[in-house]
Structures are given as C-alpha cells and as structure tokens.
Image (cartoon, helix red, strand yellow):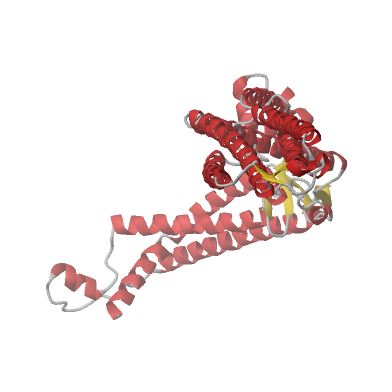
Amino acid sequence: MNEGFEQVLGYVRGIWRRRLMVLGIAWFISIVGWVWVYLLENQYQAQARVYVDTQSLLRPLLSGLAVQPNVGQQVSMMTRTLMSRPNLEKVARMTDLDLRAKTTKQQEELYREMESRISLAGTDRENLYTITYQHSNPDLAKRIVQSLLTIFTESSLGGTRKDLSTSQRFIDDQLKGYEAKLLEKEKALEDFKRRNVGSLPGQGGDYYAKVGEVNAALEQARFELEEAVNRKKQLEAQLQDQEETVTAPTPVTPTTTALDGRIAALQSQLDNLRLRYTDMHPEIARTKQLIARIEEQKRQEEQQVKGQSPAAIKAQNPIYQQLTIAIAEADANAASLRARVAQLQGKRNGLMQAVDRIPQIEAEYTQLTRDYGVLRDNYTQLLNRRETASISSEVESKTDTVEFRVVDPPRVPNTPAWPNRPLFVSLVPLGGLGAGIAIAFLLGQLRPSVESRKQIRELTEYPLLGMVTRVETEAVRHRNRRLSLVFATLVVALAGAYLVQMIYYLFVSQAA
C-alpha cells in the first residue's frame, strides 16, 4: 500500500514540476476551444406533437358489415416510413429545398441531411407522436415540421382507400368470370336433364330402389296369376260334374234366367278393365265377345221356352250358371293379371337394359351439380364480399375512422437547441488541463527523475550512506517565487476568462 502511494506521489511531483507546461497547454486548448464554441452555428429545433385517435364509434356498429382495417398497424407503419425517400422528396418540394440541389449528388446530400435531422418519437400504446427537426434557420425548421405533420396526417388513409378500390375491381372481374361459368354450367345442366329425362336421380326414386319395387311387384303379380289360373281349373272341373239344364215343373220366363246375372257380372268386369286399359286391349275385346255369346245364348233360350209346352220346358241349372259366371270372372281376372305381368316384365326389362347407363347418368349428374354448386357458392360469397367492400369504401370516403389531433402545432423556441455553449465552455478548460496533465505524465515517463531515497536504492542496489540537503540561494528563491506568481496569475486569468464567458452565454446572449 505504501509503495503504491509513494509511486503515485512520485507521479504527482513529476507533473507538479512541469506545472507551467500543463497550464500553457490548458490555455492553448481553452483559447482554441472557446473560439470554436463561439463560432459554432446555432441550431434551432422545431417541434410538433400529434395525437392519433383510433377509437372510432363506427367500429362496433359496422362490425360484420364492413371491413375493419387495422388502424393501429397502419399508423405504426406510417411512423416507420415517415422518413422514406418519397416522403423526403415531397418535403423538399413543399419547402422549396429541392431548388438548392442542382445535381444528383447535391440531392443525395440534401436527403441524407434531412433524414439525419428529422426525429419522430412516440409510443404506439399512447398514440402520441412528436416530430422534431433542427436547422440553423428557425423558419425553415418550422416549415419542414409542418410539411412532415401534413404528410403524417393525410397519407395514412390514402393507402386504405387505394386498397379498397383495387379490391373492388378485382372482385368485379372475378364476378364476371364466375357469372359466365355459371351460365355455361346451367346450360350444360339443362341439356343433360333434357337428354336424360326420367332417368335422373330423384325422378321416381333411386334406380336400384325402382328395380327392387318392380321385381317385388312382378313376383306378386305372377303369384296372383298362378292362383287365378288354378281357381279357373278348379271351377272348370266342378262344371264338368254339373248338367247344363234341368226340367222345370213350371215355365221359366227369360227375365228370371241366371244368364242376366252372368251378363251383369261380365259387364262390371268390363267396366273395371276400361278404367285401366283402352278399348283396343285384348282382355276388353275378349270380355265383349263373352258377353255377346251369353246374350245370344239368352235369346236362344227365350225362343226355346216360347216353343215348348209348359210341361216340357227345360231350365238352366243354377249351379251350372254360377260356375259359368265364376269361370268367366276367373278368366277375366287371369287375363288382367297376365296383362299386368307382361307390363311389369317389360318395365323390368327396360330397367335392366339401363343397368349400365343409369349409374353413368347419376355420376355425370352428380358431377354437374357439384361443379355448379361450387361455382354458385363462390359467386354468392363474391357478391357478399363486393357489398362489404362497397360499404367499407363508403365508410372510408365519408367518415373518419382515424382522427388526428394536433396537440402542439409546429413552433420554434427563441433559444437555440444546439450547441449548449455553457456546457462546452466548461468542458474546454477541463479538457485542456487533462491534456496538459497527460502530456506532463508522458514526459515524466520518458525522462524519469529520482524523487526519493528508496528509488536510489532500488536503482543502484547499493546501500545509502547519507543525504546532502539542497541549499537554495536568494536568487533561486526569487526565481521560484516569480514562477509561482506567474502560475497563480495564469490560473486566476484562466478562471476569470471562464467566468466571463459563462456570464456572457448565460445572461447576455440569452437576453439579446
């Protein structure tokens, strides 16, 4: 610890011996520095503050009806691009600075200088921004800040309106294309339906369900036909065991014969057949022939009854007549069932012939309807988007979603923002003294001197036997006093010069 202190003390002694040199260097640097501070050009700072209000009452009201742009993001992007090259060129034109730059190099220097002097400070959270610019001409600084404020408040929404206009044109072009595609698909679908009428899905049910229904109906009709044929055979077997006529004890009038009942039954059967078929159908023609034969038989019996005596009159067997009527009904029913079986068989054959064509028709129809549905849905969505874009455009053009409030208009204080001459005046002599001390220390290291007995012992490595005290003469003491007086005078003069300048810059220059 003592060794370090002694070493520092030795450095201080070496510097003190060169104190006049230190003070001379401080004076030189102070004079040069004070002249430089005095010659510095004043820089005036113009400043403006603007508040961006993004909380519009229309946002919740138009939610879902119009596109709500991210206003915060737009303002943030505007703050980042305020000092872009196009904006700097616009500011130069608005303030006539571009007239000073004649060449490309001068223009580049002008834009770089403007960019270095412009400052935009603020926070996205509070939406309060401060625009500043420094220049030696306070009026020019104010005009530049005003131009920047104008660009900041006017150009932030232009991009949104341009984007909306571009979006509307794009949607209109897409709608025209989709409309043409829809018309083409509608025509193709119409032609397909016209070519395949009756075979399309949904017309009479599904194809395979129709095939199942026809097969089931055909099996049922065949079963009923088989029952009708068997019943007819049974009736014919019973008819063979019966006599056609029996001897009647009393005359039988034609009106009481059983042939009338048979004719009435066949006539009823004929009416039922006419409800389902035309008069050209074979079953209807067969029924008419049977009715005609029975009517002829009735006339013959009536004539026979008229020609016989009452005791010899023969009458029709009622059981025979009933069996005949039942056979006729069974025959008519079987004929009807045969026609039904034939009809169902033809329908089944037609469906089986289309077994390969129906699935292809269904697949083509499904594809056509699917493509048409996709186009229609996209067209509907584009219509909704166009209406949304139209409302959004109206909102942007007729309302202000963002409101700019100028809190502080551009202004320039009377006092310059730079340089801070009192500070510089204070730093200059301190810097001079520091430089003088540094040079004196370096000289002491280059030309060292012995300051203590310990240094002699360390340098010579011999024991120290004694010391000789230096005796100063009167002339030496007079010279030392004179040097001390000069040193004190220079120190006081340096302090006085510093105080005079501080008083001037703090009071006189500001009052002026």
Considering every residue shown, the one lying at the far top of the view is 103
Considering every residue shown, the one lying at the far left of the view is 462
Vertical position of residue 333 compared to residue 442: above or below: above
Q: Residue at x 55, y 43 (%)?
A: 240
The one nearer the camera, 451 or 233, is 233
Residue 199, position as x, y percentages in the image: 60, 31
The image quadrant where one finds the N terminus is: bottom left
On screen, residue 297 versus residue 256, left or right, reads left
Residue 249, position as x, y percentages in the image: 75, 49
The one nearer the camera, 48 or 180, is 180
On screen, residue 131 versus residue 335, left or right, reads right
Vertical position of residue 41 compared to residue 424: above or below: above
Q: Residue at x 17, y 73 (%)?
A: 457
Considering every residue shown, the one lying at the far right of the view is 398
The one nearer the camera, 284 or 278, is 284
Q: Quadrant of residue 97?
A: top right
Residue 365, position as x, y percentages in the image: 58, 32
Vertical position of residue 465 compared to residue 26: above or below: below
Q: Quadrant of residue 17?
A: bottom left
The one nearer the camera, 47 or 274, is 274
Q: Residue at x 20, y 71 (%)?
A: 456
Residue 423, position as x, y percentages in the image: 64, 57
